[in-house]
């Protein structure tokens, strides 16, 4: 089956089985390995991508379901060589250790900030509740997202 | 690389989907959010192992979205829980449903999982069920040559069993608007606070005049084998004046009723007082 969709702002066409998981399409067919697979059952969020504006687990989406949609993966977040504000703040806050959870964390936070550029701490926690991190203890990640919100929004609550 | 190795049919209209289901055999499964079906397939769960045709209902606009008219609110079966959480009508008119939906899984799960998907398997732990039950929810079910509307309670036959026939699809969830003003609460207990499978869910709606209980609706999930209402208890409470003693009394009876349904289990020593205490807290919250 021909899978046509918009990926990181550009048209993508992949020929594969319709029942292939989307994460495999990204990693194996397109070699976009920024999207990680942790659990494969929707619990860890390492495979998070943004599909039609909302964060989803790409291990729970089939290739056929992506047809016609707009997808943003971690590879599409930076502006060329210039890192996205979230990425800069993750580095600044020490929110990246092994880095396995980072693409998912960044994308979940990105989806939140698109919707709500002035989130409360609870709203940030809720947005990343589906993303597990084995390294940081989450504090640095929260700090990075808060800092980004502050920079986006000088009158931020946090 | 994981390929579910099945055919995926993606109908664009309800008629087309119902036609697929009419030609359906036992190997056909409906795919909505995929948070159950795709996991089930990749994990080799018995419920899905034999299915080799998936009918993906995500592109059918007739069964998505939330509408309101004078007498009811109608929610398309394939509306995601995320859409439900963000919807204004639901926020204003169905706060318990909003709360229950917002406690399902994670943001990513809620952005895929659908409202009908939450109850079509009739898993006891489906979070939205007690909330839907206290709102006296009905569901619309269609097949290529039939259409019926039944109450959700009737639909939920037994654990993991429903009234749904092979060729049928749940198309809408219908909640009629009440004249009376109800106040309510929803409570979920899981093993941890976020992204947890429920051990106990409770929902209650009360219409009060001064302190008198004009009407009350009570439902539980997870702790009972299927989501269920408590008609005897509701009858008992109706018409009474809401006092602290009454709240305690209702909560105590609630525990007994739950025990009556589940029988005594190893976990009863823990669950019974938790049910009673939590239900008491819910009632007190509404009383205030
Ligand atoms: S790999 Fe998709 S949620 Fe863990
Ligand atoms: S940095 Fe290692 S899992 Fe989060």
Image (tube, rainbow, N blue to C red):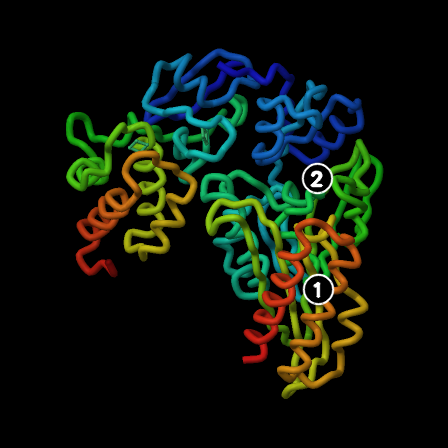
Q: Quadrant of ligand 2?
A: top left
Q: Residue at x 24, y 31 (%)?
A: A97
Residue B65 is left or right of residue B166, and the answer is left
- Reply above or below: B234 against B189: below
Residue A87 occupies which quadrant of the picture?
top left
Q: Residue at x 36, y 49 (%)?
A: A125
Q: Nearer the viewer, residue B155 or B79?
A: B155
The answer for which chain carries disc 2 is: B
Which of discs 1 and 2 lies nearer the camera? The answer is 1
Residue indicated by mark 1: B255
Closer to us: B185 or B23: B185
Label 1 Cα crowd, 10 Å radius (few <14 / some 14-19 / many 20+): some
Residue B78: x percent and y percent? 61, 41
Q: Give the residue number, with chain letter if any, for mark 2.
A: B121
Q: Position of residue B10 (x, y in %)?
A: 62, 26
Work out whether residue A128 or residue A54 is closer to the camera in this orientation and state it. A128
Position of B42 with respect to A144 (left or right) is right
Q: Quadrant of residue B138?
A: bottom right
**Which percent across, then down, holds residue B7?**
64, 17
Q: Is residue B161 above or below residue A122?
A: above
Residue with the most extreme bottom position: B210
Q: Chain of mark 1?
A: B
**Labels in figure, total:** 2
Tell me the residue at 69%/46% (across/down): B124
Looking at the rendered structure, the secondary structure element under dot 1 is: helix
């Amino acid at each position: 089956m021909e899978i046509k969709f918009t990926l990181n702002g550009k048209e993508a066409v992949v020929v594969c089985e319709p029942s292939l998981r989307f994460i495999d399409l990204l990693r194996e067919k397109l070699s976009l390995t920024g999207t990680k697979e942790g659990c494969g059952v929707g619990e860890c969020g390492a495979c998070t991508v943004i599909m039609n504006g909302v964060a989803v687990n790409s291990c729970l989406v089939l290739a056929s379901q992506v047809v016609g949609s707009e997808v943003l993966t971690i590879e599409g977040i930076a502006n060329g060589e210039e890192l996205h504000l979230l990425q800069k703040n993750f580095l600044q806050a020490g929110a990246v250790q092994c880095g396995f959870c980072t693409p998912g964390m960044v994308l979940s936070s990105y989806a939140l900030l698109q919707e709500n550029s002035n989130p409360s701490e609870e709203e940030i926690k809720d947005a990343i509740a589906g993303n597990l991190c084995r390294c940081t203890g989450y504090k640095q990640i929260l700090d990075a997202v808060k800092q980004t919100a502050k920079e986006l929004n000088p009158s931020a609550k946090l | 690389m994981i390929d579910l190795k099945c055919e995926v049919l993606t109908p664009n209209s309800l008629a087309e989907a119902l036609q697929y289901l009419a030609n359906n055999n036992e190997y056909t499964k409906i795919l909505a959010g995929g948070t159950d079906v795709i996991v089930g397939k990749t994990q080799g769960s018995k419920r899905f192992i034999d299915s080799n045709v998936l009918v993906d209902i995500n592109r059918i606009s007739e069964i998505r979205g939330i509408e309101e008219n004078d007498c009811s609110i109608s929610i398309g079966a394939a509306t995601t829980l995320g859409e439900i959480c963000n919807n204004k009508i639901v926020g204003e008119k169905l706060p318990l449903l909003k709360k229950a939906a917002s406690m399902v899984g994670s943001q990513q799960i809620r952005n895929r999982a659908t409202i009908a998907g939450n109850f079509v398997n009739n898993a006891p732990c489906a979070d939205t069920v007690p909330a839907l039950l206290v709102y006296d929810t009905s569901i619309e079910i269609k097949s290529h040559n039939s259409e019926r509307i039944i109450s959700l309670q009737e639909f939920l036959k037994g654990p993991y069993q429903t009234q749904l026939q092979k060729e049928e699809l749940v198309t809408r969830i219908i909640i009629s608007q009440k004249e009376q003003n109800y106040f309510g609460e929803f409570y979920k207990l899981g093993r941890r606070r976020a992204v947890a499978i429920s051990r106990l869910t409770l929902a209650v709606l009360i219409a009060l005049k001064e302190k008198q209980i004009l009407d009350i609706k009570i439902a539980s999930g997870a702790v009972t084998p299927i989501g269920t209402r408590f008609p005897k208890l509701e009858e008992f409470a109706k018409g009474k004046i809401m006092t602290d003693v009454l709240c305690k009394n209702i909560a105590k009876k609630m525990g007994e009723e739950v025990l009556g349904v589940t029988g005594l289990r190893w976990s009863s020593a823990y669950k019974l007082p938790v049910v009673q205490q939590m239900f008491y807290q819910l009632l007190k919250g509404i009383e205030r």
